[in-house]
Structure formats: structure tokens, C-alpha cells
Amino acid sequence: MRRRFRACTLVPSSPRPPRPAMATPGGLIRAARRGTLAQNMVMDRIFSGIQPTGTPHLGNYLGAIQNWVNLQEEYSSVLYSIMDMHSLTMPKEPAVLRQNILDTTAAVLACGIDPKKCFLFRQSLVPEHAELAWILGCITNVPRLLRLPQWKMKRASQSNGGTVGLLTYPVLQAADILLYKSTHVPVGEDQVLHLELAQDIAQHFNKKYGEFFPVPKAILSTTKKIKSLRDPTVKMSKSDPQKLATVNIVDSPDEIVLKFRKAVTDFTSEVTYDPASRPGVSNLVSIHAAVSGLSTEEVLHQSVGLDTAHYKMVVAEAVIQKFAPIRNEIKKLQEDKSHLIKVLEAGAEKAKELATPIYQEIRRLVGFQ
């Protein structure tokens, strides 16, 4: 398997310790119950989450979910959460949110997430996330949150000037990670500053209450950021008002072909990779490489002699082939809502069992008991 991610330490830290043998999720829970996880023992643990916005788009899949699938094979303790609490930072109708949670769950399962190899759960079913966020919020200063670019950007879209939840959700992100003593977090470039905040909070807590949290490291995807097909200077987004800008993983083959045919490139027909001067064509090359598993150089070698018009159809066909089985599986899973609910509830039970002894120790450290 070609490894499509790399670890990145954003703060000075000690070398990663060897992974304990037989560190299965069930074994970790049993060990936590027995209290045998020594406080100074750092066990590799992955945590990541996705907001329930319905079925993901191409950028979500290549930038995050594809890495999730790889990571559940690489690590023995992996937690993935449907971040329904975070989704409230932007207004949602309850019925829409409920459906989005199920659609997102169906999508990540169809993409290859296996609940037997990881914990897949809904964030709000583990109340310790919110409780720990309050504790961590009490050691986080407001000016630090006000400097985060996401706050500055997203508050502009809210008529009330921005809610408390929008301001403090990075603290909840830190709680999501630290609640399980996670050691590694897969992140996109736009979330690096939030992980740095989580690292700082972990260090501040350790300084105040004694060494407790491992300082989590970033795992950055080697997949280039996928850009809009209509404006290759900005990233692909589901909220883009231009319908042809974003490829969704449930799009039909005809829709995918149309979107790539209309993709913005330039007046040079040769296929090259130069993001600075040819962002549109370079975005197509990045997509082609990511869905095919080839390197940029291999993609360019295969594309010698093709003009950009023909190359768009090559990329479209590669995307269609990649998403065809996923799209079919999503439709099948969406027809069984009770199964999706059971998967999330079972995952939440396992996550809660893992979190409970850690959170009880946090309560003791801060003086609650």
C-alpha cells in the first residue's frame, strides 16, 4: 500500500515510542478499566473528525477520508467522529442535521472505514467532549482565539457578528483530541493552527496540573489541496455557489463529465504541472494523481501528447471509476438507517468506555473529586 500521508511535529517533542504489542481497541478499553495504562506511557492513538454536511465531495475524500482508510490499517488505536456538535456553529435545521449525520456516516463507511478496525461514533453521544471543553476553555485566553483566521472569516457570514460557539469551537476540537490522549491527528493545511492551539492547551494543562496529556502531532496528507474546478485559486467547497465547481462523490458519470469538461484551465494545450502559473491544469493533475495512486511525474508521463480538452476527459473517467463502487454502496447504506444508527451508537459506547477513566482522572486533577 502506498502511504499517502506524513507525520509532522508542530512543536518539539520526544521520539515516538514503540507501539505496544496487541494494542487492539478492545484491549485498550480493558486496560483502561483495570487502570494499567501508566500515566507516563504514550500509546499511538489517532483521532480525527468530520462535520456532517451530507455526502462528501472530491476534496473531502482525497484530503481526509482516503487517509482515514489508510490510517486504520497503519495504527491499532483509531477514533473517527461525526462532529455533530461542531456543525451547530453554522445554523442548521434539525431535520437537515439528522439526515446529514446519516448521509455522512453512510459515505465514510462506503469509502472503506471499518468499525471493526476503528471507533466510528457521533460526537454528541459522548458528553465528556463538552465537559472537557469547559475545563480547557477555562485555561485558554480569548485573544488567542480571536487571532484564529477561521473566526475572522466565518464571523463575517453571521449577521450577529459571530456566536460564542463559533469563537470557542477550536477549544472543543482540542477536547475532542485530548479526551482520548490522542498522539496523532490527521489535519488539512487549514486546520494546522487549530492543532497548534490543542498542543498549547495540552502543554498548559500539563504545566498546571502535572504531566498528563501527550502533545498531539499532525499527520499531513501528501495529497495536494484540491481546488475548485471553476476557480482553481480557491479550495473545492460544498458551499460554492457555482454548481460546476465541486464534484460530489455521489455525482452521476454524466455530472462528473460535465463538471470536468467545464473546468477552468488556460490557453496552453499541453498538460504540465505548475501550480503558480497554471493552477487549473495543475489541479487536474493533482486530482488524477490522487484518484489513480500515481505520482505527479507518472501522470504527466502518461499524458504526453494529450491536449487539455482530451485530458479533462481522462481525469473525469478516472474519477468516475474511483467513485462508482462508493456511490453504489452509499445508496445501499442509506436505505438502512437503523444500521447506520447502530454503528454510531456502538462506536460511541466504545469511545465512552475509553474516555471515562481518562476524564475521571482529569476531574481528580482539577479538583472536582
Image (spheres, rainbow, N blue to C red):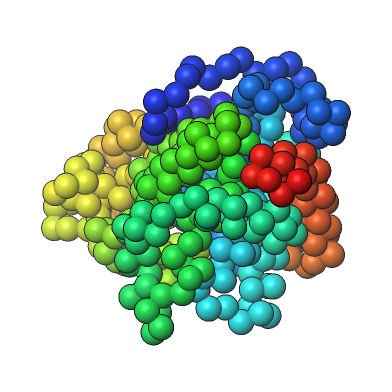
Q: Is residue 163 left or right of residue 105?
A: left
| Position of residue 243 measured from the top left corner of the image (x, y, whole percent) | 40, 74
Task: Give percent across and percent down for residue 73.
Answer: 65, 30
Q: Position of residue 327 (x, y in %)?
A: 62, 58
**285 lies above or below 104:** above
319 lies above or below 230: above
On the picture, is 369 further left or further right than 281?
right
| Residue 79 visible within the image | no
Quarter assignment of residue 38: top right
Is 178 left or right of 102, judged from the image as shown? Answer: left
The N terminus appears in which quarter of the rendering?
A: top right
Q: Is residue 299 visible?
A: yes
Left or right of 127 on screen, residue 284: left
Identified at 30% across, 50% down, the residue is 283
Q: Is residue 265 above or below residue 301?
A: below
Q: Quadrant of residue 118?
A: top right
What residue is shown at x 66% (from left), y 79% (from top)? Answer: 94
What residue lies at 63% left-to-right and 36% top-to-bottom? Answer: 181
Q: Position of residue 194 (x, y in %)?
A: 43, 49
Q: As rendered, which of 166 and 141 lies closer to the eye?
A: 141
